Image (cartoon, rainbow, N blue to C red):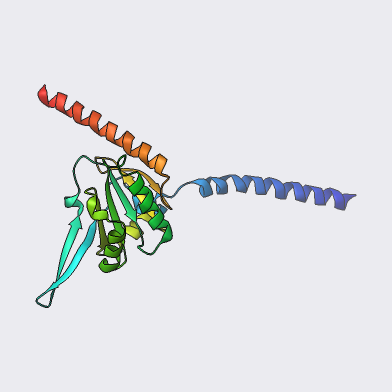
Amino acid sequence: MKKILLASLLLSFNFLTFCQNKKPTDKIATKIDSNKLPAYLRTKDLPVIKLYTDITKKDGKQDTTLFTNSNLPANRPVVIIYFSPECGHCQHEMKEIEKNIDSLKNAFFVFVSRFPVDSIKGFEKKYNTSIYSNMVFGKEASYYIPVFYDIKFTPFMAIYDSKKQYVKSYDQGADMRELNQLIAKLTVENEIDKKSKKKHTVK
């Protein structure tokens, strides 16, 4: 009987100790370490963009055409798409963007890839993207964008407002209906902001 009582007391003591230890451990586990978040979730600013949009050779020397943040149009939402010209999902996303281009015309699309410029140009030619003034395609000069967004799948899409501040991202492409609504919302917000600034300037 004494042995049974002693065993029960030990079990009760262990259970109480477990419960007491469990609470702070859970708190630590659920606490988000902001340093472990991808860079794009730690800052709302648009990342550094440096793309080779064309590479040619003249007199034996390589001549490159660069696209950077300074080339982005002002007062327009920006959509960054990290893609692969050979990716089937990326091609599907491109087709969907083309179908919805009228409702997406207020956004500026920046297509970023790690593939050679020739391969990217093949993709552009396939979809005749030269007719769209709100798109740029290029090979990233470094490997900054995939690290910045911690990209695991393509196409990866990140949307920024007209002030170049982060709004939303999609790990494997966006639903076009949702993207249309988001760009429309950002466009309206931009127009309201411009009118507000104009009124303050007049005063």
Q: Is residue 40 left or right of residue 192?
A: right
Query: Looking at the picture, how far across and down is residue 195, in whole percent?
Result: 19, 27
Horizontal and vertical percent for residue 117?
26, 66
Task: Give the residue at the far left of this rendering.
Answer: 59
Residue 38 can be seen in this image: no
Q: Residue shown at 37%/36% (left/top)? A: 181
- Which quadrant would residue 163 be assigned to in this image? top left
Which quadrant is home to the C terminus? Answer: top left
Where residue 196 appears, as percent x and y from the top left, is: 20, 26
Q: Which residue lies most toward the bottom here?
A: 60
From the viewer's perspective, tell me whether residue 53 is left or right of residue 149: left
- Residue drawn at x 52%, y 46% is 30
Q: Nearer the viewer, residue 139 or 152?
A: 139
Determine the residue located farthest toward the top in the rendered image. 203
Numbered disc total: 0
Residue at horizontal 36 percent and vertical 62 percent from the top:
84
- Residue 49 to residue 122: above or below: above
- How far from the left and from the top, in percent, is residue 123? 31, 61
Q: Is residue 121 visible?
A: yes
Residue placed most toward the observer, 169 or 33: 169
Q: As rendered, which of 64 and 149 lies closer to the eye?
A: 64
Front in this rendered view, residue 196 or 184: 184
Q: Is residue 59 above or below residue 180?
A: below
